[in-house]
Each structure stands twice: as C-alpha cells, then as structure tokens.
Image (cartoon, coloured by chain):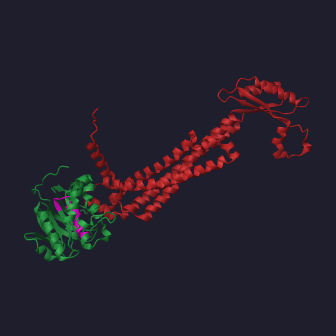
Chain colours: A green, B red
Amino acid sequence: MQVHPNRWGGELVRFENVGLRYGAAPETLTDISFSILPQSFQFLTGASGSGKTTILRLILQSLKATRGMISIFGQDTAQLDKDGLTALRRRMGIVFQDFRLLDHLTIYENVALPFKIRGRMESSYRAEVIELLKWIGLGDLIDAKPPVLSGGEKQRTSIARALVSQPELLLADEPTGNLDPVLAGRLLRLFAELNRSGTAILIATHDISLMDQIKGSRRLVLHNHHLQAEG
Amino acid sequence: MASSFDFHNQRSRLQSFLTRFSTDSLVAPDPLTDRTLVAVIFILTFIAALTAGLVLFGSAASARWQALLSSEVTVQIRPQPGRAIETDLNRAADLMKQVQGVTKVRIYSYEETMRMLEPWLGQSTSLGGLSIPRLIAVEIDPDAPPDIPAIGRQLAREIPGTAIDDHRTWTRRLATLGNTLVIASAAGLILIMTATALAIVFATRGAMVGNREIVEVFYFMGADDRYIARVFQRHFFRLGLRGGILGACLALAFLALFRFVVAGSDGLRDMFGFGIIDPLSSVGLAIVIAILAVALFVSMLASVVSRMTVHSTLNRLV
C-alpha cells in the first residue's frame, strides 16, 4: 500500500485534539495533541493510570479515539482499512509492559515471530536473531522457554522481539520496569543506539532517572487527562 | 541430457511454502481442551464411518438379496379334486423347461415340502397323506428373464390350481428397505457432521478467547486476519486429523471383527455373502475407502469450520 506524506511533512505520528471516553464516562484523555518526528526520542510520562498505555494503544489502533484526528505514517487512521492498518503496524515495534511472550515457544522463536508472521524464510533471519539475542545477553537461553526466565530476561526478550525487524517507530510501555538499574541503563543505551540508526522511540515510563539518562529527549507529560510537551 | 531442474530454486520455494504453513505451533496448546476435542471427533468419526459403511453394506446386501430373489420363481400347484398332483407337477415342470430364459427346474418332493411345513405343523406322522400344495423351483436367467405373468397365465389355463410367484412383493420391500436405510443413514451422517462442526466452533472460540493476548500480539506485529485464521486452521486440522484417524482405525477394526464373525457363521455367510465384507472385493474396498474418506472429511471440516469461526470472531475479540 502506498503511503503518502501528509501536510505536516512526514511526521510519523500526529494527534490533533484527540479525546477518548469509555461509554458515558468523562473523557480519560482530553484534547491530546502531539507529533512524533522521524528519528526522535521521547518519553511519555505521568502518574499511574494517567493514560500512558492508552496513548500507545491509540497509536497502535487497538483503541479508536472518540474524537479528534490521528495520523500514523501520514495516514489518517479514520480512513484506514484492515490491510492498511496491518501495513502500518509492520513499521512499528512494541514492547509490552507485561511482555506478552508466547510461553510455548522458545526465546528464539518468540524473537523471530515478526519475521515468521511476514512469511520470511528462517534461513534469511536466523543469524540476525541469534546475533541480537547474544547482544542483549540472552545468547545462552536461545532454546529456553519464557516460564523459566526471570522478569528481566522476559523483558529483554520482549525488547528483542520489538527491535528485530528494525521498526521506524518503537513504542515501549515501561520497558525497564522489571530490570535492575545497570541492565535498565544498558537497555536504554540500546534504545539510544537504535534511535541513532534511524528509529523514532516513544517510551512510556514514570521513572524520572531513566529519562534523565537520555540527553536531548523530549518529554510528553500526561496530567489531568491533558498532555503537555516539554523539551 | 542436462536436467533443467533448478534444485536451489525448488528448495527455496519449498522452504517458503513450509514457512508460510508451519504456523501450527503458534496456538498455545491446551492439553485438556485439545484432548477432549480429539475424543469428541474420534467418537463422532467412528459413528460416521460406521454409518457410511452401513450404507454401503446395506445397499450391497439388499442388492444381493434382490438379485437372488429375482433369479428364481416358484410355481405352486394346489391339489384339485379328481386330478393327480404328481402328473400336474411333471406337466408344469416340462412346460417350464421349454420356456426360453429358464435355466433350471426342480420339483420339491412331498417329503421336502413336508419338511418346509415342520415349523408350523410339527413332525407328526399322522399328517401322512395330507393334501398339501406342491412347489417347483424354477431358476431363470436374470439377464434375459422370461415373461413371468404370461407364463403364469398359460400354466393356469393348462393346469388348474397353478400359480406362479416371482417374489415381486419381496423384492419391492427389499428395495424400499434399502432406500430407507440409505436415506436414514445419510440423514444420520448430516446430523453427525453438524454436531462435529458445532463442537469445532465451540472449541475454536474457546481457543481464541484463551489465546486472546496472543492474537493481539500477532496483530501488533503486523499479522492480518488471514494469517491468524491460518494459525488456528492448522491447529484444528491437526486435532481433527488425529481424532479422525483414531475413529477410522476403530471403525476398520470393527469391520475386521464383523468379517471374522461372518466368516465363522454359515448362516451369516449365506445371508450376506462373504464377498461383501471381503476388503478385496469391490464393496469391501468401497467400505474401507468410505471410512478413510470420512476421517479425511472430518479433518477438513475441522479446518474449514475453524477458519470461518476465526474470521467471524476476530472483529469481536480484538
């Protein structure tokens, strides 16, 4: 599917006056407006329950906004059909807060899943996946299955799965929540390196110290259902 | 001669094919649900396979009985006052021998006729000399049968008290019985397949709800509905095939046991004909093929129904 640049000039994500409510309840997100530029690095922060995960789900289009306009990779999501949505999601990577690993598959199979879904032959990606697993410190656990892993190992597997297809936009929901500070710092450097190679990063977190480690990053702060951009 | 077969290209295509379809392991196994579904499919396949076999067997047995009845007619001569029945029997037999299409004529003796009546009259010697109707068995060529009603009329004119029975009533009843059996079995098969399909629908929905988070992960990684449907389709095809093979194996074992029982019983062998249940005979082979076809059909039904269920459920699930 052909993706045309929009009038905002190649922004990866653009929210304009987006609101979201569940049923007749008051809006959980009100007048949210922000954009994500190519190769940018931003944190999405706010108190627990402020709507960080909800914004990620709106970007992934697993939730539909009640009002406002959302554009992803230049596509107005209101006009997307299923095939178009699939094409957009293939340009993104997602790290879930609860990992979402497939317990009956090995670490290698979990990380290789994006390639498998895209119908690629295993011979074309096997070396790439193993190299990434070694780099992320899981080289000895290639054939292990998630239930025997620690929280940190599961988180790293989840991150590897999001990174392996080198997405244009990486969304991460509390990616370092289960890691010790040393490993968290190392993973953050991994995100930074990925960012330097051209991937835009959006990390939802409430960890201030984590945000301080990336100089020049932008902070999107959720407070009282509204979003405020800093930096 | 140099071969034009591009081995590398063919291997790549095969690998691509395998990659595309080796999606069966992506559905998280649920041993209890999977085993239950396999057991349900196994039982339903066994019943369906037996029903299919019964249709073929019943049709073949009915056809055999009809053929046997059609190849013989019976001439009955009632004793008439002032007439010698033995003379009438010989006269009727002579007339029948002259008819084109008649292959064999045999008069049942008085003793043979009395033995036929034993179940009703007993072995009482006081019945000696009882005036009873006598029979002539006439075998005819089923491919070129004579005009039985015309012969009957001729016999009645020349020998009073003569009637001819071509067993038409029985052949008609057998044909009706055979057709009823086929229709009832077909209806039974449809019901069994419907029950199988419903069991698979429930199992697929259960599996999708159980794998809801995995389905969502697939979506976020760029899987489309077709891919997700294929994942579940493969899973349920394998379960269906497993249950189907088990059901077919039990049905074949049942058939072998039936064959063994028939082979050991003169009465059953005469009734059904050993050829009908011999796996090497055309009917026996058809029954074996029908049983295997039922197993394969059930597997394919599982595959198609699960795919349709996935497509109809996905929108509501995620």
Q: Nearer the viewer, residue A182 or A55?
A: A182
| Whether residue A134 can be seen here | yes
Q: Position of residue A138 (x, y in %)?
A: 23, 67
Q: Position of residue B8 (x, y in %)?
A: 26, 44
| Above or below for A166 versus A228 | above
| Whether residue B156 can be seen here | no
Q: Nearer the viewer, residue A81 or A3?
A: A3
Q: Give the position of the N terminus of chain B as an image quadrant.
A: top left
- Where are the magenta residues, as a range? A154-169
Q: Position of residue B34 (x, y in %)?
A: 43, 61
Image-based side of A38 in relation to B128, left or right: left
Residue at screen point 10% across, 63% down: A196
Q: Is residue A165 magenta?
A: yes
Residue at screen point 28% across, 42% down: B7
Image-based side of B192 in relation to A108, left or right: right
Q: Is residue B166 magenta?
A: no
Q: Nearer the viewer, residue A231 or A28?
A: A231
**Mostly what secondary structure, the magenta segment?**
helix
| Above or below for A152 versus B27 | below
Q: Position of residue B94 (x, y in %)?
A: 80, 24
Q: Quadrant of residue B90?
A: top right
Q: Nearer the viewer, residue B153 or B48?
A: B48
